[in-house]
Amino acid sequence: MPLRETLRIVNSRRRFRNRKQSYFHTTPLEERQRVIEYLCNLIDSREAGRAYEDVFGACVNVIGSRRAHEVLRPRYARKLENVDLNDIAELAMTKLNPDEQAHCITKLFRPELERLSRNLKGRRGREYEYRIAAVQNVFRLTEEELTVLEIFYVIESNSGAEILKNAPFDMTDFQTLQSLGHKVLGLDRKRFLTAIKHGCLFDARLLTSEDASVGIHGSIRDYLVGLDDRKLSNAYFDRAVETHLKLADFGLLSDDLKVLQALLRDRKGCNILFYGQPGTGKTSLAACLAKMLGLDLYNVKVSDDDHTHDFRLRAVFATLNAAQGRKAVILVDEADEVLNTGLNTVSRTATAKSWVNSLLDSHGQKIIWIANRTGLVEPSTMRRFDFSLEFERLTSKHRRTVLTYELKKQGLSGFLGAEEIKELCRRYSVDASGIVHAVKVLKIKKGMKKESVLKLVESVLKNHEKATTGKEPIRKAREKRQYSLEGLNTSHDLGHIVSVLKEFGMEKSGGAPRSVTLLLYGSPGTGKSEFVRYLGKALEKDVLLKHASDIRDPYVGMTEKHTAHAFREAQDEKSILFFDEADTFLFPRKDAAHSWEKSFTNEILAQLDGFNGIAVFATNDVEGLDHAAIRRFKFKVRFSALTPEGNLYFYRTLLLPLVPETTPFTVDHIRQIKDLRNLNPGDFAVVKDQFSFGSSERPEHQKMIASLRFEVEHKIDHRRITGFS
């Protein structure tokens, strides 16, 4: 006997022995009914001849050993001698030849199966009927698709269907399913093949296929069994997305808004993509558009306990079916898992490109897709979107809108003043979700003290920003009320520059971008940064401070995006854009060791050309700047060490008030102060702090002059900065 046939017989005997523990007659009525139908179809198709022993054993398992013995005894009494009831299934292999096996199956067992089927008809469980009908309704399954789905449910749930999990009748093998499935199910072959190849069973992840092995998805099986009590449609979508924001709150360009409205008002289907930074209002805008246009919004859910990728694909299908024929728009939030057809190295999942493209081409409904990243989306998929809109990080203005809205939503309008809201949103660059979380988690009430609330809000926002961005929030700037242009040693008249910039602010731009760019350079502590803050107060403008850590990003293209966002935010807010430590922004391109250094400088210069506002760059190392870029600045202001008169001015302004009025300020003191070289305003501030906070020494002129001399002696670089010729 060939080895393959021997192994098949051995395996068959093992399965028959396992059937002794089968509880087929205690399984649900609908499962037993289906198993009987599959067996009858298999016998009628004459495919049973492939393995009579397996079919014989399956029939015995379904009919029951005792009833099988009664049916066989009139014809095969002699062969049944000494055969235990539990061993009836093995009779076919030990005592019956193929013709006798065929006779038992077709003439004896087949009528008995028919009798059992008649007895079970009309007795199917109502719960199962309700659940299988719900699956058919939610996914709009044809009768053939539903029949195919049921066989895989029965195969996994009922021991009587074990024959359909093993060769040669293994329905879980895709090749066998294609060739024999229609016979086992009693379906027309063409309709059957259409159901498994062109229906939604696999596309909607109702059935899974891994390594050519087919099975029902676990969540669908659990629902049919009764482990999930939710209404099936509620598992896949909801209509609870609400917003009280207005379209004006999003700062959309009028042309973009017109396109969105036209697409959503059209009778035809469309695909709209909102993508970009998380928490920037993408979902809120979708809800706002639907509300304004009078459209029902169907939100495709994200599951907490199901495999995200398979669940999202199944939920998309369910939602499309629910919204069909309605005046509605579908929202697929967090659509990255669906649209990213490149392999995700973290989750190791990817949607087939052909699946996504086919869906985008054929669904015929209005869908807004929302994604945080599009790096793994194929160009052929991106081209299928009728309109794409990028969302960048929230500006301070947008954060104010969100915070004001959330306070209003909680019944706290006016609880925080406009300036307090403005300061919070300036310091903490959190996304919308962070602001919402801060308001909700603190459960603010009108009776609470405002100072305490502000501290708590700042604590929540600070930790949220650090957790999500890895960066510390902007520190609140110390008030330096005594800062004055007087006494500074600069190459240009700063008062004149302030006057010019005031005139610039009053003029209206008639089309082409107009900007004023300043380069402030000089040793540390000479007053460059403080001048920018002074300028902001003089012009009544906020100062938008940017360091290299706010802009540079290790991911390709993100540095350029952050740069563009900084310029756009400053222009929208009408703020002064201030790049401190400019040598970290404007690399000398001729000396660049990496391509990103060149592209960084190029992006800064390109943004300057199109900027409409005031931009200031400050640096301690003017030689470290790109020399071609320096020519772009309208004002190049050198901040030098103080003159003797400057020394005396800052001494009188900052240090003299610390000494008791009764202590004489002599000509010798004045001479010593004027004789000091290479002093900066920052040195006077340091000495003031030394004698103001926690110092046990009594402020005296000679001691403070000695401290100033000490500051000069310990400067690393005594060289005079000469600037430009």
Image: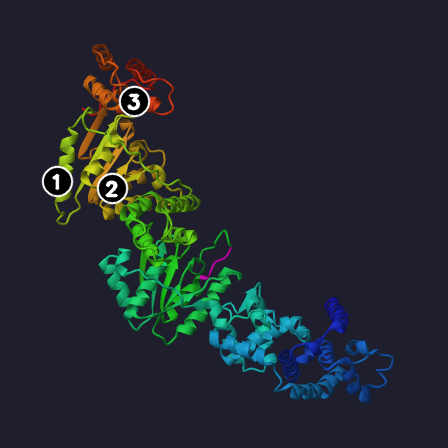
Q: Earlier in the sequence, mark 1 or mark 2?
A: 1
**Frontmost residue, 472 versus 261:** 472
In the image, is 477 to the left or to the right of 350?
Answer: left
- Three-letter code, disc 2: Asp
Residue 724 position (above or below residue 359): above
Which residue, given by chain and number where applicable, does mark 3 sit on? 683
**Frontmost residue, 425 versus 588:** 425
- Residues in magenta, as a range: 348-352
Which residue, given by chain and number where applicable, does mark 2 sit on? 542
Taking the magenta stretch, the answer to whether it contains residue 350 is: yes
Instruction: Provide the major secondary structure of the magenta segment.
Output: loop
Residue 78 position (above or below residue 445): below
Which residue, given by chain and number where applicable, does mark 1 sit on? 503
Which quarter of the image is occupied by the N terminus?
A: bottom right
Residue 493, how many percent across, how many down? 15, 28
Residue 244, how many percent across, how many down? 32, 62
Q: Residues within 10 Å of mark 3 (few under 14, many from 20)?
A: many
The answer to whether one can see residue 385 in this image is no
In the image, is 323 to the left or to the right of 122?
Answer: left
- Three-letter code, disc 1: Glu
